[in-house]
């Protein structure tokens, strides 16, 4: 692929710019092909998304139109998650006890609540305290916002969904926790949000997902594209991260116009 990078980039292959462009292309291509990027089915992290239209697109496995964006924050997050998983497993091995269930896959819904089989891998579950633990690697402004205004409801729902999944396997979750790691900073900037596990939070989110699914079946926007308008959008500054965001779109079957406000995830 990079047999003649100088010609491809219009710069010398061994120049700082040539090397920068080569690395950027390799990183972007690899990130695009990563398992998380290729996920097709909806997961617990998405169920609490405040935008019904985005959830409807996802449930329909609609073609993504917004595939661009800088992959670096996601890469940093994925790498951090992998390192933390190894650290927790190393702690288990060192102590000789499997205190932490790491990247344990749980079934959140067998289809009886939302009409949709939903499962996923939780970052960690602390069997000693009954705590669902989810890692988040975030930017400076988001860290400041969450510490002063509280975390996203979507995150709270995700943590409780995993709690429901562990409850279904016979565990007794008591606490849900989000460990917020600074994307650029020191470990001293780690902040942890905790809340009491609430089964109702998870069940309500699944029922909402089921209602959107039922509306999709009733309206059939695949056959009647004009019906996409019946799914309200929750336009926000986070729209530019949505795979279905298409600025200026007037055809919702192609993409959602959303909102273009800047946002630090």
Image: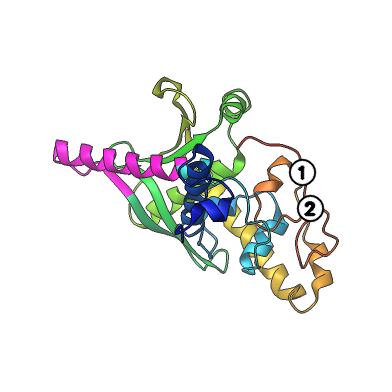
Q: Quadrant of the C terminus?
A: top right
Q: Nearer the viewer, residue 88 or 37?
A: 37
What residue does disc 1 label? 260
Visible residue check, residue 252: yes
Task: For mark 1, give the secondary structure.
Answer: loop
Q: Say which residue appears at 50% left-offset and 37% top-offset.
A: 16
- Among the 4 quarters of the image, the one containing residue 95: top left
Magenta residues? 76-102
Badge 1: few (under 14), some or many (20 or more) residues near its Cα, within 10 Å? some
Task: For mark 2, give the secondary structure.
Answer: loop
Mark 2 / mark 1, whichever is N-terminal: 2
Q: Nearer the viewer, residue 58 or 196?
A: 58
- Rounded to the nearest whole Å, what is the CA distance between mark 2 and mark 1? 8 Å
What residue does disc 2 label? 247
Residue positioned most to the bottom: 223
Give the left or right position of residue 62, taking residue 94 as reference: right
Is residue 88 positioned above or below 244 on the image? Answer: above
Q: Nearer the viewer, residue 174 or 105?
A: 105
- Among the 4 quarters of the image, the one containing residue 35: bottom left
Q: Name the spot of residue 233 as percent of width and height, x first.
A: 77, 53
Q: Say which residue appears at 75% left-offset and 61% top-offset.
A: 255
| 78 in magenta | yes
Visible residue check, residue 203: no
């Amino acid at each position: 692929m990079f047999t003649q990078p100088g010609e491809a980039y219009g710069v010398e292959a061994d120049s700082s710019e040539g090397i920068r462009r080569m690395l950027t292309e390799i990183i972007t291509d690899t990130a695009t092909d990563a398992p998380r990027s290729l996920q097709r089915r909806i997961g617990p992290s998405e169920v609490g998304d405040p935008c019904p239209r985005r959830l409807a697109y996802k449930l329909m496995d609609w073609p993504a139109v917004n595939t661009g964006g800088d992959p670096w924050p996601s890469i940093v997050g994925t790498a951090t998650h992998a390192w933390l998983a190894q650290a927790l497993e190393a702690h288990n091995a060192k102590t000789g006890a499997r205190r932490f269930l790491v990247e344990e896959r749980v079934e959140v819904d067998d289809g009886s609540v939302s009409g949709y089989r939903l499962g996923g891998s939780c970052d960690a579950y602390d069997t000693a305290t009954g705590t669902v633990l989810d890692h988040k690697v975030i930017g400076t402004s988001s860290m400041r916002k969450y510490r002063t205004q509280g975390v996203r409801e979507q995150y709270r729902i995700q943590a409780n969904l995993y709690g429901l999944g562990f409850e279904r396997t016979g565990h007794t979750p008591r606490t849900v926790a989000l460990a917020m790691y600074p994307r650029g900073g020191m470990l001293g900037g780690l902040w942890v949000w905790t809340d009491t596990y609430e089964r109702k939070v998870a069940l309500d989110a699944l029922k909402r997902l089921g209602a959107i699914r039922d509306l999709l079946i009733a309206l059939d926007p695949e056959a009647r594209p004009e019906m996409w308008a019946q799914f309200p959008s929750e336009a926000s500054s986070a729209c530019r991260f949505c795979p279905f965001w298409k600025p200026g779109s007037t055809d919702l079957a192609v993409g959602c116009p959303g909102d273009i406000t800047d946002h630090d995830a």
